[in-house]
Structure formats: structure tokens, C-alpha cells
Amino acid sequence: MFFELRQYRIKDGKRAEWVALMEEEIIPFQVSKGMVIVGSFIGEQEPDLYVWMRRFESEQDRIGLYKAVYESDYWINVLKPKIDPLLDRTRIVVTRIEPTTKSVMH
């Protein structure tokens, strides 16, 4: 098992709109496809920071879930057009992490 820690930078003044899109549409859609969303966060002192985390059982699991989400007609035709005006894609940082033996997240 491993996690993806995803750090996004949101375009100026768009964070509330981004959080609403994530919580009302993107996260529910991804969960409906089988994604496990561990958490969603905003930067306390960085108004453009949004961080979220997903858990995968294996690389094969990740590949299948990516395909189910990102190659779907709904993602391509409905969600992606809403994302692009809000998200600075050039500043996305995705870090794959594994829990240590004492971590409460497994």
C-alpha cells in the first residue's frame, strides 16, 4: 500500500470555488470509481495551497483507478473543463509516500 500526497496551487481568488468543486464533484466522482480519499486540506497561511491524499493498495490498483477516472467521458467532458480555469497545473506536486510501521494511516 502507498499514498499519493498531492499539492496544488489554486489561481488567485479561486480557492473557495476550487474547494467546492473538489468536495461536491471531484471527490464524490473519484470515490464512486473506487478511489480512497484519505483527506483534503487547505493551507492555513498559504491562500493558494490545496493538499489532498489518496491511498492505493498497489501500483496495479493505481493504474486501474487512474484509467477509470481520468479516461472516463465524465472526467474529460464535464470535470476537466471546470478544473482548468481554477488550477495552476504547472505547480502540481505529487509525492508517493508509504506509511511507517507506527503510522496510524494504513
Image (cartoon, rainbow, N blue to C red):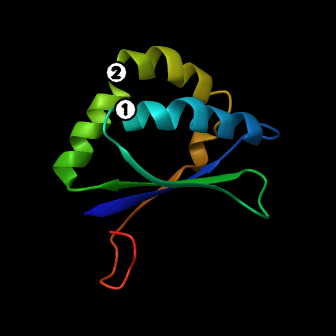
Q: Which residue is mark 1?
A: 32
- Front residue of this view, candidates 60 and 29: 29
Taking 11 as reference, is 80 above or below it?
above
Residue at the bottom extreme?
A: 102
Is residue 1 shown left or right of residue 20? left
Secondary element under disc 2, as helix, strand or loop, is loop
Q: Label 2 belongs to which residue?
A: 72
In the image, is 49 to the left or to the right of 84? right
Q: Residue furthest left?
A: 60
Disc 2 + disc 1, Cβ < 8 Å? no
* Residue type of the residue flagged with mark 1: Ser
Residue 45 relative to residue 62: left or right: right
Q: Is residue 9 above or below residue 43?
A: above
Residue plotted at (60% across, 49% down): 8
**Residue at (32%, 24%) from the top-left corner?**
71
Residue 28 image position (x, y, % from top left): 47, 34
Q: Quadrant of the N terminus?
A: bottom left
Q: Residues within 10 Å of mark 1 (few under 14, many from 20)?
A: few
Q: Position of residue 74 (x, y in %)?
A: 42, 17
Q: Residue at x 30, y 83 (%)?
A: 101
- Which comes sooner in the sequence, label 2 or label 1? 1
Three-letter amino acid code of the residue under disc 2:
Ser
In the image, is residue 84 above or below residue 40?
above
Hey, which quadrant is residue 19 in on the image?
A: top right
Q: Quadrant of the C terminus?
A: bottom left
Along the line of sight, the residue nearer the viewer: 17 or 13: 17
Residue 40, image x, y percentages: 57, 53
Q: Which structural element holds mark 1? A: helix
